[in-house]
Amino acid sequence: MIQDILSTNQLTDLQKKIIHKVIQEERLNQSEGIELFDFDLGLLGVLASYVNRRKNQDKVFFNKNFHIEPTNICIYDCKFCSYHRKINQSGSWEYSIDEILEKASSYKNTGATEVHIVGGVHPNRDLHYYGKMISSIKKILPEIHVKAFTAVELDFMIKKVHLTLKEGLTKLKDYGLDSIPGGGAEIFNPEIRKEVCHEKSTADQWLTIHETAHIVGIPSNATMLYGHLENSGHRIDHLDQLRNLQDKTKGFNTFIPLKYKKANNSLSYIGEVNTIEDLKMFAVSRIYLDNFDHIKAYWPMLGKDVTQISLSFGVDDIDGTIDDSTKIYSMAGAKDQKPTMKTSELVDLIKTAGKNPVERDTVYNVVKEY
Ligand code: V47
Ligand code: SF4
C-alpha cells in the first residue's frame, strides 16, 4: 500500500524522501518531523499505523487502574490549569491519609494493578508525607504498582527536605514508588513555557528528574501539552528532547500527547484544536519517537470516539478503567464528567476498531489477552 502511495504524483520530493526513511526505519530529523504536520491526514494515518504495527502488531493495551488526587492546592498558577486552588479557597480539597487509605481499601480484590497519584504542589507537604502515604497504600494493596507524582511535584517535595534529586528519588523508591507519570512536561520551548506556566520547574529540571529516576531504576512516562500557544516546530523540539533522553536511558514506558482543554482557565480565549489536529499529533508522535514502544491516548481527555479513531493513527494504548476520581480533565471541560470504563467497555472499544485488546500492567507485562 505504501509503495502505491509513493508512486502517485501528488507527493513532493521531500514527502517521498520522508516516506522512504520511515519504511527503511531511518530516523527523521527535526525539519522532516515538522514537515509531517503538512501531510495529508489519511497518509499520516497509514504511515503511523505502519510504524505501530511493526512495534505492536494489532495489540491495543489498557490496564485496570484507579486515580487518587490527594489535593488540588497548588503553589503554582499555570494558565492552562482549571484545577488548582489556594489553601481555603472555595473548591479546594486536601484528603487526609485516612481518607486516601479508605479509598485504596475499596480496591482490594478488584484486580486493579495500578494506582495513579497526581495532584497540586501543596506548600506544606514534603517527601516524607508522600512517602508514608505510598507505604501505607502498599500495606493495604501489597501488589499494587504505585505510579505517582509529576516531576513538578517531585522537584518541590525533594527540595523541601533538602535532599539531592538522586537521594530523594531513591528514598521515594524505598517508600514504594514504582514509576513516575508523565505530567509537568507541558512544552519544553522556554518562550512558550514562560507564557503558559512561568513559575514552575523548567524543561531542563523536568528532563533531569526523569533522567535521574531512570538511573536509580524508576521508569517513567512522558507527556506534551499541545493545542495552546505552541507551533509544530515547538512540538517537534519537545519530541526531539524526549527522543534524545530515551536514547540515553531507555527509561520511558510511553508517550502521551495531552490535548489542551479550555474550560475554566486563563487560556480559554484560544479555544481547542480540532480532531484532525489531534489525530495528526498522535500520528506524528508515533512516527517521530522511533525509540518509544508505546503511544497512549488518554481517553478521559479525548473522549471515547476520538480515542477509538486514534487507534488508526499510531496509538496502541488507551490507559485504563481510571474510575471516577480524576478531576484534572473534568474541571477543564472534558465530555466525561465522571470518567470510568468497565473492562468490558474498553475491550469492546478496542475490538470494534478491529484490534486485539491486551490488559497490561504499568510496565507492559501482559496480564490477559481478550
Ligand atoms: O502536567 C492540566 C495536564 C497534566 C490541563 O503518565 C491539562 O499515564 C489539558 O500527569 N488541558 C497532569 N491538560 C496529568 C498527568 C497524566 C495524565 C494522564 C496520564 C498520565 C500518565 C499522566 O495534566 C499536567 C498538564 O499537562 N493538564 N490542565 C488542561 N486544561
Ligand atoms: Fe499546579 Fe499542576 Fe495545575 Fe500547574 S498544572 S497549577 S503545577 S496543579
Image: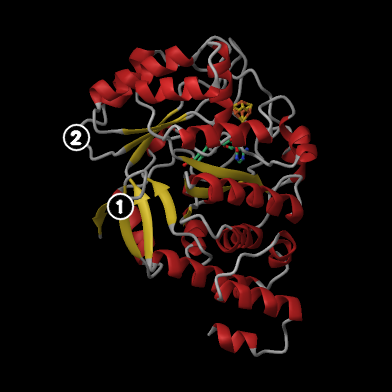
Q: Position of residue 234 (x, y in %)?
A: 74, 49
* Residue at the spot of label 2: 109
x 64%, y 30%: residue: 205
Compared to residue 337, the image places residue 160 above or below, namely above
Q: Which mark is residue 359?
A: 1
Image: 138 above or below 218: above
What residue appears at the point 30 percent right and 25 percent down from the top-left corner?
Answer: 104
Residue 256 in sight here:
no
For ligand 1, tell me if the residue under mark 2 lies within 8 Å.
no
Gap between marks 1 and 2, in whole Å? 17 Å
User: In this view of the protein, which residue sits in the foreground, 26 or 38?
Assistant: 26
Kind of residue at disc 1: Glu
Q: Residue at x 43, y 54 (%)?
A: 317
User: Three-letter amino acid code at disc 2?
Assistant: Asn
* Residue 149 placement, left or right of 35: left
Which one is in front in this view, the residue at disc 1 or the one at disc 2? Answer: 1
The residue positioned 72% from the left and 24% from the top of the image is 199
Please state the quadrant of the image where ligand 1 appears.
top right
Is any part of residue 238 visible from this angle? yes
Cβ(mark 1) to ligand 1 < 8 Å? no
Place residue 197 in its image quadrant.
top right
